[in-house]
Amino acid sequence: MKAWAASVEEVFREASARWTLLAYFALSSLFILLFALAVNLDIVNGALAGARLFGRAVDLGGEKIDMDRLVLGFETGFSGFLYMLGTFLALFATAHLVPRLQEKGTVDLYLSRPIGRTKLLLSRYSGGLLLAAANLLYLMGSIWAIVLWKTGVAHPRFLLGGVVILFGTACLLALAFLIGVATSSTAVSLMGTYAVFFFAAILSAHDKIAAAVSSEWSAGLVRALYWIFPKTAELGRATVALVSGGETFRHIGQIDRLAVFGSTGLFGLVALGLAAWLFSRKDF
């Protein structure tokens, strides 16, 4: 257990020593600062009477807008952007963990410790996921606090959207680890994971694509690929639906939610399992 905890701790130390941790949180801080400075609201009796975004006045047509409705709409729209931003920043900051581990000298040092290869890899994965979770909490928590400060209104389910984002990040990080074990390349890990992210998003329209192809086997292949790959577009929509309100999220349907989260979670588990198996059999 101590060896596991030490390995997780070293993920943070390594990220700090290589400036990854500083750059990770600096980018998030810059975004938070820009957000705080860009949004200026004139609130009268709990309603929005005027607004300025990035220094430009927003025409409200002379009407006052209910703050609760405004904040809910803003948090809903912004959660989709944070899904992309949080996922991409997390992968960019953690994709190096396996290639760095497999460098000559580094891997020899780690393998000399009283911890098995599978546990070593899983501890690195846990450390990377904790790093991503910490930054996501910092990013979304800060924006939630700024909205509360400026409007006096905020919805806790905006923070719950971060749980869905972290789930998607965990599954994609497992893929990055698998590619990292196979190639020992940070660049390939990033490019491969990002490619799967966008390819899987395209497959969300698998019904239309299957209807457009010329043969039945091609349509079957498209449907099969849809169920194999993670549901990146659907997770983004689920994040937005969860933040927008319980009714909207429930309209996704129990079966659809099970299919989206279940198949994506299975993809992540298989990818992580294959990464651990391949790492345990590698000759260093």
Image: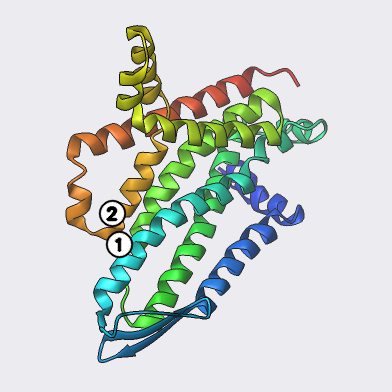
**Rendering coords of residue 104 (x, y %):** 82, 30
- Picture layout, residue 53 above or below residue 20: below
Cα separation, mark 2 vs mark 1, equals 7 Å
Secondary structure beneath label 1: helix
Residue type at tag 1: Arg
Per the image, the residue denoted by label 2 is 242
Residue 75, position as x, y percentages in the image: 35, 65
Residue 113 seen in render: no
Name which of mark 2 and mark 1 comes first in the sequence. 1
Q: Residue at x 51, y 29 (%)?
A: 272
Label 1 near label 2: C-beta < 8 Å? Answer: yes
Q: Badge 1: how crowded within 10 Å, few (<14), some, or many (20+)?
A: some
Q: Please state if 144 lies on the left or on the right of 90 as rendered.
A: left
Q: Which residue is mark 1?
A: 157
Type of amino acid at the residue the image marks with label 2: Leu
- Name the mark on residue 218: none
Rendered image quadrant of residue 97: top right
